Structures are given as structure tokens and as C-alpha cells.
Image (cartoon, helix red, strand yellow):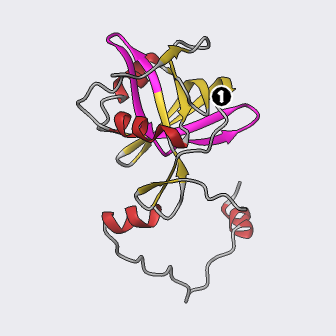
Amino acid sequence: MSSATTSALIPAAPASASPPPAAPFGQREFRDAMGAFASGITVITTQSAEGPVGFTCQSFTSVSIDPPLISFSIARTSRSLTAVRAHGSLVVNVLGAQQRDLSGQFARSGTDKWAGVEWAPSEINGAPVLAGALGWVAGAVEQEIEAGDHLIFLVAVSGISTGVESDPLLFYRGAYHELARQA
């Protein structure tokens, strides 16, 4: 395509237009602003040579129905990252309101995250399915995307289950919340 054709397709910005100045903000302000978005809580699990691996994750989302894809992000410093990369298969366990303690247990580093946790290997890929989860999504990592201090994983879904009927565990403005029921 010639530059004449390109310039006809993309109108030039007026000479007086300039982008608005970026508002300066700190990391804490950014975290607080992002905390205004309520999210569900998941525990993402996989396997390693030493046994099961898991971590609490809020950054889970559905990406596509056809083909079925999900995504999540993980900190570059996470101890679980090596296992996610090595195994390539995982299960996203969606936590219910009654699983607040489980969320905290899998959020801590340097502890035995699996102490007292009931789980079974997924028939789809062997990654742990947590007992009592509202549901789970099993899949295989399709793509890893660089994203600042995190990595985004795009996952091809190979199995799903809706488990326990319960309210979801929610996180909003730095704290756990439950759904308010209307009378």
C-alpha cells in the first residue's frame, strides 16, 4: 500500500490536538483504583515433580467461547511459575464463600499450602481439583504473554465442571465480601 493510500485512510490529527497529560500516580493508588473492581477468587493448580502446586488468583477471566479459552496472570516472582510452565496443564478452581480460609492458605508463600486440603487429580490432565469448589476449568497453556511484572497465560480449555451450589467468594477493595441477597 502506498503512503498516499495510507494517508487517505488515516486522517491526520489536527495540529492543535495534543494528548492529555498523564496523571501521575503511585503503585498504591493504582492498586486502590483496581480494587474498585470486585472479582471472584480462584486457586490455580498444577503438578510438579515434588507434588501438587497451587496459588490464589483473582486475575482469571473467560476469553473466548469458540474456541474455549481462558486467561490468568501470575507474578514473575511466584514460586508456582516454574511448575505452571513445566507441566503446561492446570485446573482453575473457583472458590465459594465458605472457602475463605483456603484462599488465604494458597496465597501464602513458604508454607505447606496443601496441609489438610482435600483434592483429587483431574481426569482431564491430572492437575488437582479442590473439594468443595463451585466449579473448575481444566486446560493446557497455549500462550505466555509478557505483561510488566506479571505474565499472562492463555489457556485452551479441555474440561469443565460446575460443582457445589453456593455463593462465590468475592474480593473487593482489599477485603473478602459475600453477595447481598435481596428479599
Above or below: residue 96 compared with residue 148: above
> Judging from the image, what secondary structure is the residue with disc 1 in?
loop
Of residue 1 and residue 182, the one placed in the foreground of this image is: 182
For the view shown, which residue lies furthest in the front direction?
Answer: 183
Percent x, y of residue 10: 69, 68
Q: Judge left or right: residue 86 versus residue 134.
A: left
Q: Judge left or right: residue 54 versus residue 62.
A: left
Q: Which residue is mark 1?
A: 163
Predominant SS along the magenta part: strand
Of residue 7 and residue 128, the one placed in the foreground of this image is: 128
Above or below: residue 166 compared with residue 89: below
Percent x, y of residue 127: 50, 17
Of residue 136 and residue 117, the one placed in the foreground of this image is: 117
Determine the image quadrant of residue 83: top left
Identify which amino acid the numbered label 1 is placed on: Gly
| One can see residue 83 in this view | yes
The residue shown at (38%, 49%) is 148
Determine the image quadrant of residue 133: top right
Q: Which residues are magenta?
A: 45-73
The residue shown at (55%, 53%) is 178
Determine the image quadrant of residue 68: top right
The residue shown at (69%, 74%) is 11
Percent x, y of residue 41: 50, 43
Q: Find out whether residue 10 is within the magenta segment.
A: no
Above or below: residue 127 compared with residue 22: above
